Amino acid sequence: MVEQLSVSHADRTTLPAGTSETTTPVLDVRHLTKVFPIGGLFSRAGVHALQDVSFTIDAGQIVALVGESGSGKSTTARLIARLVKPTSGELLLDGTDVLKSQPRPTMEYRRRVQMIFQDPFGSLNPVHTIGHHLARPLQIHGKVRSGRDLRERIHALLDQVGLNPPAEVAAKFPHQLSGGQRQRVAFARALAVDPLVLLADEPISMLDVSIRMGILNLMDRLKDERRIASLYITHDIASARYIADNTVVMYAGRMVEGAESVELIDRPAHPYTKLLLSAVPNPKAGLKVTRTEARGEIPSLINPRPGCPFADRCPSVMPVCREQMPGFERLGDQHWVRCHLYGAGSEDHALAAMRPLTLYKPKTNRDVAAD
């Protein structure tokens, strides 16, 4: 449970990176929840794919959502893209709650929020040239005035994503390009309509390791050149450390930890975050490194039981973990965790009340009791 935090004079030194007291986040996600009904018309059963997810992204900022398959990362992106309707929550774009003001997604919203899909081989029509793929959004959204203008815009987009010579690439068909080149075309197509938000759903997972870094560097460059607010979805926490300003770790549809990316990697708090980091290969450590093994099974998302969803797999599980959902605990500037190990009275509890990663102030268990 979280409450919106107003900015006071004392808070000005602890604002999230890229924001100020006068800045409205480009993307503001509040308490986003999605339950997929199952079992027929009169059944109350449902898959709780996403529960109470909140974060903000500013212009020129990249936020990463990290977690294994089934954690709710892609569902979050599809809800933001409005490909799926949320069960509850708010979605603010430039300060406007689009779920209330626009019950159905408009063409303008589609233009402002663009999505890069995981599969570069399935996102392009094999019967059309690359130039055709880029021309369609430019024409539909009225971005060009003449044939010459159209060609110049297409060539400029291809050049911006590093596909040269542009004229030759525009004349090719998708099967004539590599996986990395196709993914760059997907980025160029998204950039054609000048979006405010870019949702990149596992953009490098299907690419060869040798070309993944090129896509990450492209995203980093576009962040600076275009000032786009980007959501980077990945299961690879190491790549999140490389490209993202802030990182949120998700498990079983819930946020479990968030911080600036460097802080999260250097000082992980949640047992699940530590588990993800222990799985990252470390050539320097070699065979000497001690890896944490996950025990138990991933919990069912169908009518989940009370308590922490990670309890059955956690090496530090306590009785309270199976009985009560942990609250958000603040560990430092922009660093928060949802874990009973850091609750009030524990050795790891942070005494200083500082702002978390998002523009929301997580309530501690004591706050809930006071309410």
Image (cartoon, rainbow, N blue to C red):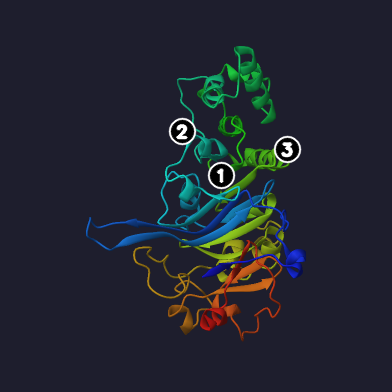
Where does the image place residue 286, in percent across and percent down from the top left? 67, 60
Where does the image place residue 11, in percent across and percent down from the top left? 73, 67
Is label 1 in a helix, a strand or a loop?
Answer: strand
- Can residue 9 be seen here? The reply is yes
Is label 3 in a helix, a strand or a loop?
Answer: helix
Where does the image place residue 202, in percent across and percent down from the top left? 54, 46
* Label 1 crowd (10 A; few <14 / some 14-19 / many >=20): many
Where does the image place residue 29, in percent across and percent down from the top left? 54, 55
**Of all residues shown, which one is farthest toward the front?**
101
Residue tagged by mark 1? 199
Q: Which mark is residue 122?
A: 2
Q: Estimate the spatial distance between the alpha carbons at disc 3 and disc 1, rounded to whole Å.
A: 17 Å
| Quarter assignment of residue 139 | top right
Task: Identify the amino acid type marked 3.
Answer: Glu
Q: Estimate the spatial distance between the alpha carbons at disc 1 and disc 2, rounded to whole Å.
A: 17 Å
Give the answer, above or below, for where 223 lies relative to 17. Answer: above
* Label 2 crowd (10 A; few <14 / some 14-19 / many >=20): few
* Direction from residue 301 to residue 69 in the image, left or right: right
Q: Estimate the spatial distance between the alpha carbons at disc 2 and disc 3, rounded to whole Å.
A: 28 Å
Task: Identify the amino acid type marked 1.
Answer: Leu
Callouts 2 and 3 close, C-beta under 8 Å: no
Is label 2 in a helix, a strand or a loop?
Answer: loop
Between 194 and 234, the one lying in front of the other is 194
Residue drawn at x 49%, y 38% as measured from the top left = 119
Task: Identify the amino acid type marked 2.
Answer: Gly
Q: Which mark is residue 225?
A: 3
Q: How many marks?
A: 3
